[in-house]
Image (spheres, rainbow, N blue to C red):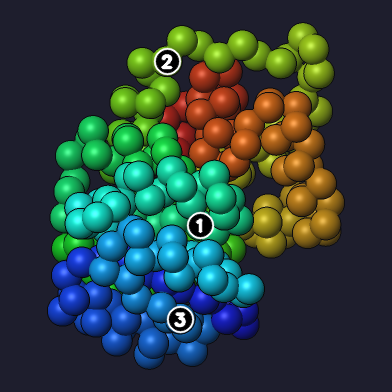
Amino acid sequence: MNDNIKIVLADDEALFRKGISFILEKQKNINVIFEASNGQELITFLNGQSTLPDIVIIDLKMPVLNGVETTKILRATYPDIKIIALTSYHTKSFIANMIDVGAVSYLVKNTTPQELITTINEVHTNGYYYNDYVLKVIHECIILPKKKAKSRFDDEQLTNREVEVLKLICKQYSGVEIAEKLFLSSRTVEGHRNNLLRKTECKNMIGLIIYAIQNEYVSMENLVD
């Protein structure tokens, strides 16, 4: 990947934060532009910037302003910034809550450096990245408790090609990979993705995944190994 990915870290543990920064700065395509010790420090930094980061990697438990509340503010104020949760909390309720408020990926702090780097690259390319466990939590704690969403099938039917693209999105293929599989241009795939968001009234990729499962375009068995 040739794009330079601008990263901001937010974690109150200075030693851990510096360690992550050291690992990421070794990557040719990743640039850590700021480190914050709490959510308020992060928001203050962003408010003063003309060029925003691509990704914020954030802990849940921080003083002054925690990760959940910070994520809510970021989603409302800077919707283009992708948020990766990196925390020691791995219970289903914490994962579901962070995904629900806008995190596009969730990692625990015992993850490997390579898994973190892979997640950053996948999020930068696709806009989101969930491992099998997080996908199962999304299904169990977000999808199942909610009433089955109204399908738009009768109002604005998805085309066969849009369904193909939707299924590949749910499997976390990138736009380029979808284009290669379906023998389409990347621009055409992007058009199908925008149509899917419009027709389903979803705001993001996790919304499309939830929609696809609720309306039985895919099943959880298709999404996880």
Front label number (2 vs 3): 3
Q: Amino acid at mark 2?
A: Lys
Q: Position of residue 222 (x, y in %)?
A: 46, 35
Q: Position of residue 173 (x, y in %)?
A: 58, 53
Give the mark nearest the N terminus, 2 or 3.
3
Identify which residue, 202 or 113, lies in the foreground.
202
Label disc, if present, on residue 157 of the rendered structure = none
* Residue shown at the point (68%, 27%) measured from the top left: 201
219 w.r.t. 69: above or below: above
Can you see residue 81? Answer: yes
Separation of disc 1 and disc 3 at Cα? 15 Å
Res 10 quadrant in image: bottom left
Q: Which residue is mark 2?
A: 146
Q: Are marks 2 and 1 in contact (CB under 8 Å)?
A: no
Separation of disc 2 and disc 1 at Cα? 25 Å
Front label number (2 vs 1): 1
* Residue shown at the point (20%, 62%) measured from the top left: 109
Identify which residue, 218 or 8, lies in the foreground.
8
Res 162 quadrant in image: top right
Q: Position of residue 123 (x, y in %)?
A: 50, 60
Give the mark nearest the N terminus, 2 or 1.
1
How many badges with numbers are in the image? Answer: 3
Q: Amino acid at mark 3?
A: Ile
Would residue 147 be found to the left or right of residue 51 on screen? left
* Residue shown at the point (62%, 36%) measured from the top left: 203
Secondary element type, mark 2: loop
Front label number (1 vs 3): 3
Q: Which residue is mark 1?
A: 82
Label disc, if present, on residue 33 of the rendered structure = 3
- Neighbourhood count class around disc 2 (C-alpha, 10 Å): few under 14, some 14–19, many 20 upward: few
